[in-house]
Amino acid sequence: MSTEAVAARPAGDSTTTPTDGTVRLSGVALVLGSCVSLQFGAAMAMSLFPVVGSWGTTAVRLAIASLVLLVLVRPRVRHWRRTEWVAVVAFGLTFAGMNGFFYAAIDRLPLGVTVSIQFLGPLALAAALSRRLRELGWVGLALAGMALFLVADLTGHSVLDPLGVALALAAGAFWALYILASHRVGALVPGTGGLAVALAVGALVLLPFGARAFPTVALDPRLLAIAVGTAVLASVVPYTLELAALRRLPRPVFGVLLSLEPVVAVVAGLVLLGQGVSLLVVCAVLLVVAASAGSTLSARARAA
């Protein structure tokens, strides 16, 4: 999920509630476009796996995306204090873990299944922060979806690689840490400078795992084009679209729309990668989507 736009918002900045139906509709289109771009970017990235591996692909993608944002944003790091640097570096570490483990997982699991499993991280975080039975219920609904994935595996309707599942769960855990780190950076660093530097930190962290990928990609025009396309589709475009959508939609609507990412991932896997899905897998994905949307609406109700 690309929640970088939320992370980049300054503390206290509230989403404008639109009164014009056209503006709201354009916001919906922007969020859906972000989801499509993100998942199709992930599908494109998989064509690099046989050459440079999933970790090398992640390192190259973050490096290119960080260069683009650093040039566009030009963060004023000279004004940062130790507190800001610590927060941004921690944010970068979550970037590295979330993206690295996610790409390693989709190398072993279907894209839609990986995204669905990854959603357990934010759902568990919401339940831990709220400490309410309702939030635990949404986590339980998501776990029911995970159980359907297991049933599909046992009945031969899908194949779940155990290591792939573990990697997806690790990506979900880093996603939860990413959410906490993003709020911290949003409160300390105004604008998008923290995001740009955090992406660069994530790329540096992954450099030892993907150092050999950089010369391989740089010397092959076809691979370089795929890497640039992946960075743009999976980072730059989703961030830009989500930031624009946040100005047009209330946060609950924005969150519910982002909950559709597992469905978009299933479609991307089917169309681009030929990853077929069974009825059990579709039901499992829909349970995860319902759990994520329900958790978002519950958070809105508590705030109200």
Image (spheres, rainbow, N blue to C red):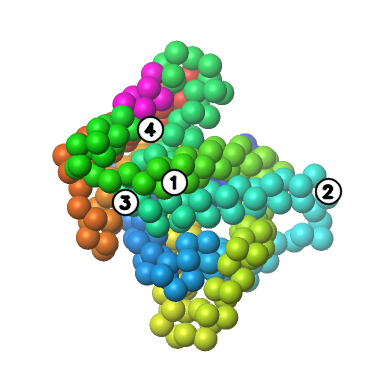
Distance CA(mark 1)–CA(mark 2): 38 Å
| Kind of element beneath mark 3 | loop
Q: Label 4: which residue?
A: 292
Query: Does 86 lie within the magenta span?
Result: no
Q: On the picture, is 177 further left or further right than 302?
A: right
Q: Is residue 201 above or below residue 125?
A: below
The mark nearer the N terminus, 1 or 3, is 3
Q: Nearer the viewer, residue 155 or 175?
A: 155
The mark nearer the N terminus, 4 or 2, is 2
| Kind of element beneath mark 4 | helix
Q: Nearer the viewer, residue 266 or 170?
A: 170
Q: Nearer the viewer, residue 145 or 239?
A: 145
Distance CA(mark 2)–CA(mark 3): 41 Å
For residue 91, say whether it is visible. Answer: yes
Q: Label 2: which residue?
A: 82
Q: Nearer the viewer, residue 107 or 121?
A: 107
Distance CA(mark 1)–CA(mark 3): 13 Å
Residue 75: x and y in percent read 70, 62
Residue 57: x and y in percent read 49, 66
The mark nearer the N terminus, 1 or 2, is 2
Pointer 2 local density, CA inside 10 Å: few below 14, some 14–19, many at least 20:
few
Across the whole image, how many numbered discs are drawn on residues? 4
Q: Label 3: which residue?
A: 110
Residues rendered magenta in the picture:
137-145
Pointer 3 local density, CA inside 10 Å: few below 14, some 14–19, many at least 20:
many
Label 2 is placed on what type of residue? Arg
Q: Main secondary structure of the magenta part?
A: helix
Pointer 1 local density, CA inside 10 Å: few below 14, some 14–19, many at least 20:
few
* Residue occupying image coordinates x 64% and y 52%: 92
> Closer to us: mark 4 or mark 1?
1
The disc label shown at residue 163, or none: 1
